[in-house]
Image (spheres, rainbow, N blue to C red):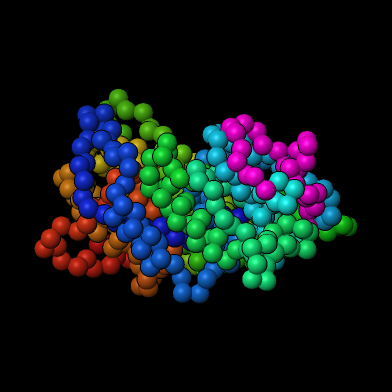
Amino acid sequence: MRSVVGRKAIAGAIGAFLLSPAGGALAQETTSAAAVAATDTAIAAAAPVARQPFRRSIEDAANLAGGLALRLSRASHREGEPLALTVDVPRAGHLNVVRVGPDDVATLLFPNRQRTDNQVPAGAFRIPGEPPQSPELLAKPAGVTLLAAFLSQEPLDLQQTGGGTDEPAPADDGFARLAPAARAQLEKLAARSFTGLPRTAPLLGGVSYLLVCAPGGPCDAAGLALATGSPSPAERLTPGLLLEGEIELALPKGAWLRRIPEKGQRLTRLSEGFVPRPYTNADNHCSIGYGHLLRQAPCAGGEPAALQRGISEAQAEAMLAESMRRAQRAVMSLVKTPLNDGQYAALCDFTYNVGATMLQNSTLLKLINAGEHQRVPAELRRWTLAMGKEHRGLKLRREREIGLYFEGQPVPKAPPGDEAPQPIDIRVGG
């Protein structure tokens, strides 16, 4: 399952921000060393004091980096069955494949003792493959296993060493355990990749989910417990757009509904988190998938049987795409200045989270329509309260939106003389 929470923030000096009539941006090819250093500092500041489980760190990093497709031979296996996977590698680089079981034990499947060189060419890379690229892969233990792949431009050292030596510390199945420091390394690279231009991204990532069933009994999602590190209902909020009535906002004359770029779609999926079965969230509402609202009341067990058995990610993505049309329409109707793809995607995610009415009445919209883009980061950072309390997931979501809004460019600092902004509750507005 994708988690709600992530870690990413960037800062830097204000740079040229020029919009063409078509809404394109004059983006810088590289970020300055000062901006990169600020990125790392902000990421560290946003990290929780108590480290979150491996699963969520690895899952967030792979989803945030994006760009890789990881395919399993079958979506479900019985415990102990051999399995195979394929990574579609879009460009040459250094490939790392990580497995995190439902017990939150993280192992490095590739590279491994059978093949220590993990530099791979573009194309379909199969594990184990022919000849085998790894020891035998077995589906275990029972539960939902996360498989994540990372492709980096430079080699990464993710293996845990054993006993004070340089030798990898093997897990029970012969694969090396993932080093505790590996997740911080992946988090930083993923954050830089998300906020930078795709062609210069230092890291690509992708995930797949393996259902491992006990040797006997039914084998479906409904019978599997949540894995260690899966987001709790208390961390999930109903998207504000789904709490308001349909607002009649007309598109500009002659305009078609503008598609949200893939990176923006990924941001919303990652921020909302995927849950395959009905659950009662922090707002006490019954939801499913990527925050899709079933009813404004707790789940009571009377939901349709098809939903109780669980929905696929593809079904959840279809539900999300339908709901996001309202956010797309709101942004296209209310924003009167040209937007590039990153700006448009960031505002669609923001609108899905807080609602079209909140956007319509916001200072943020006024600033954007006035062309005061340098004030957008400070304004977005105000929307971090939920039910009167600061919400860490909202803080991280706003930082992701800021990074996407200024994709490939340094994030402007607050203009001199600006007062410290007062936080805003996403259910109240301001």
Question: Which residue is most to the left?
Answer: 417
> Is residue 286 visible in this depiction of the protein?
no
In the rendered image of this protein, does residue 318 appear above or below residue 98? above
- The magenta segment is 116-140
Residue found at x 25% / y 41%? 335
Instruction: Name the image quarter holding the N terminus.
Output: bottom right
Tell me if 12 is positioned left or right of 398 in this view: left
Residue found at x 78% / y 49%? 135
Quick one: 127 or 17, which is closer to the camera? Answer: 127
Question: Which residue is most to the front?
Answer: 165
Residue found at x 46% / y 74%? 49
Residue found at x 39% / y 53%? 400
Question: Which residue is most to the top?
Answer: 254
In the rendered image of this protein, does residue 214 appear above or below residue 420? above
Quick one: 326 or 417, which is closer to the camera? Answer: 417
Instruction: Name the image quarter holding the C terminus.
Output: bottom left
Q: How many marks?
A: 0
Query: Where is residue 323 shown, x and y percent of the image?
Result: 47, 45
Query: Where is residue 83 shown, x and y percent of the image?
Result: 78, 46
